[in-house]
Image (tube, rainbow, N blue to C red):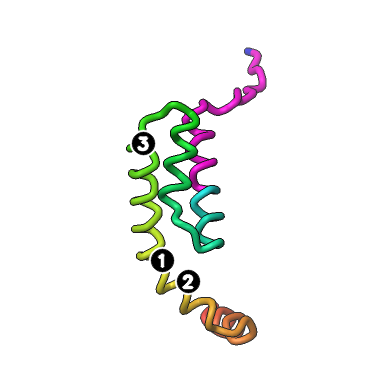
Amino acid sequence: MRIDRIRPDRPPSSDLLIIRLVRRWAATRMLGEDALIAMTRLVADTGEPPVVAVALHSVLQITEECLGDRCKRAAMVPLSSATTNRRSSL
């Protein structure tokens, strides 16, 4: 029996759109701009309905809220003490 190597094809355009939207969201957040407007414009250029941008923006906001406090607390811990705490727990 011969097994051929599986070569992944290019991802569907919808997957690429999601990646582009997440990147747009991150970039606009770093610049302090309105991410929803930027995402909606990007979706409009592709011909997809605006609800795609609105839904993904909502998911990213919820994720940011849920992880935000954890990320802020982790950023405040000095790297040397975080490494020490990790080693002591092993």
Residue 67: which numbered mark, if any? 1
Find the magenta span and give its range: 2-22
Image marks 3 and 1: residues in contact by CB distance under 8 Å: no
Q: Is 66 placed above or below 27 here?
A: below
Task: Indicate the secondary structure of the residue bearing disc 1.
Answer: helix
Residue 75 position in % (x across, y down)? 54, 77
Residue 2: which numbered mark, if any? none
Q: Mark 3 points at which residue?
A: 50
How far separated are the C-alphas under marks 2 and 3? Answer: 30 Å
Q: Is residue 9 magenta?
A: yes
Crowd tier of the residue under label 3, counting other residues whose Cα lies within 10 Å: few below 14, some 14–19, many 20 or above: some
Q: Give the residue type at disc 1.
A: Leu
Task: Indicate the secondary structure of the residue bearing disc 3.
Answer: loop
Residue 71 position in % (x across, y down)? 47, 71
Q: Nearer the viewer, mark 2 or mark 3?
A: 3
Residue 71: which numbered mark, if any? 2
Q: Nearer the viewer, residue 41 or 2?
A: 41
Image marks 2 and 1: residues in contact by CB distance under 8 Å: yes
Q: Nearer the viewer, residue 70 or 3?
A: 70
Q: Is 85 placed above or below 55 here?
A: below
N-term-proximal mark, 2 vs 3: 3
Q: Give the residue type at disc 3.
A: Pro
Q: Give the residue type at disc 2.
A: Cys
Residue at position x 36%, y 36% in the image = 50
Q: Which of marks 3 and 1 is in front?
A: 3
How far separated are the C-alphas under marks 3 and 1? Answer: 26 Å
How far separated are the C-alphas under marks 2 and 1? Answer: 6 Å
Count of labels shown?
Answer: 3
Crowd tier of the residue under label 1, counting other residues whose Cα lies within 10 Å: few below 14, some 14–19, many 20 or above: few
